Image: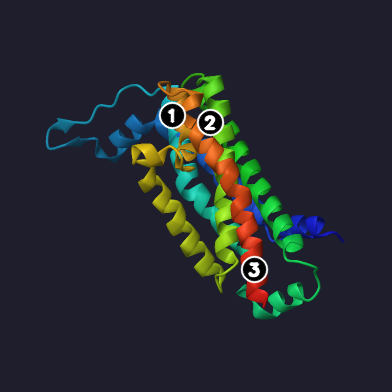
Amino acid sequence: MSLWRLEWLRLTRTRRLVALVGVYLFFGLLGPLSARYLGEILDLAGGELEGAVIELPPPTPVDGMAQFASNAVQIGTLVAVVVAAGALSIDAIPEMGVFVRTRTRGLGRVLLPRYAVTALAAIVAYVVGTGAAWYETWVLIGPPDAAGVLWGAVFGALYLAFAVAVVALVAARASSVLGSVLISLIVLLVLPILSVVGSVGRWTPAPLSVALAELPAGGYELADYAAAVGATLVAIPALLWMAVRLAERRER
């Protein structure tokens, strides 16, 4: 059995793929629904407080996609990081780490299939959620900008590939799955902070994570994300190369 097939079976039989798709699909359906009926929800919850009436503007297609994009960046990425840490933390169980190291010629043969399968699963789940959000927004509110949604989904998928690469690097040195998750999340949380710095922020992958909310709204051009895309395409193989080197060095 090839390592690629082994990783695919691990992903499906442990229900990790179901968890990924389920989370993104859930928020893909919930986002447009909450945007469409937010006013009614507030009314039922008590929209009038001390004589003040809360009035919201009519929902727009941008709102539906933005709701999904926000949840995808937060909860979706969290689930993707947890799943990736479980797959990439080879030394979380010492006996398993010894078993893997003594039966493969180079850890790259183990880590790269695990990274690729996990990243692809996260991207597929994200695309499924985006499709659900797009369709439901179209039905409940109106058609969002098609080009903006498509490019936003491409950029969001690239960000997920980067996030899983970050987990691969962290897991190469962390001694537990929980440690890999926490450190990876800290790194991914720092990036949006750097993105507010004008000259530095546009070179971080962070803008890609919110492109699905920004591009359909207009006011943004594809060129605005060129620096982030270029930096991310360079960062992903660099992170994977460092992950393999660190894991092999740990072996010694």
Compare residues 34 and 127 and report the one nearer the observer.
127
- Residue placed under numbered mark 3 in the picture: 247
The amino acid at mark 2 is Gly
Please determine whether, in this image, residue 210 is positioned above or below residue 118. above
Left of 101 or right of it: where is 165?
left
Q: CA distance from mark 1 to mark 3?
A: 38 Å
The amino acid at mark 3 is Ala
Q: Is residue 90 visible?
A: no
- Residue placed under numbered mark 2 in the picture: 152
The amino acid at mark 1 is Glu
Q: Residue furthest left?
A: 50
Left of 153 or right of it: where is 58?
left
Mark 2 element type: helix
Left of 194 or right of it: where is 106?
right
Q: Nearer the viewer, mark 3 or mark 2?
A: 3
- What residue is drawn where x is 72% and y is 66%? 107
Q: CA distance from mark 2 to mark 1?
A: 8 Å
Compare residues 199 and 30 and report the one nearer the observer.
199
Mark 1 element type: helix
Left of 59 or right of it: where is 19?
right
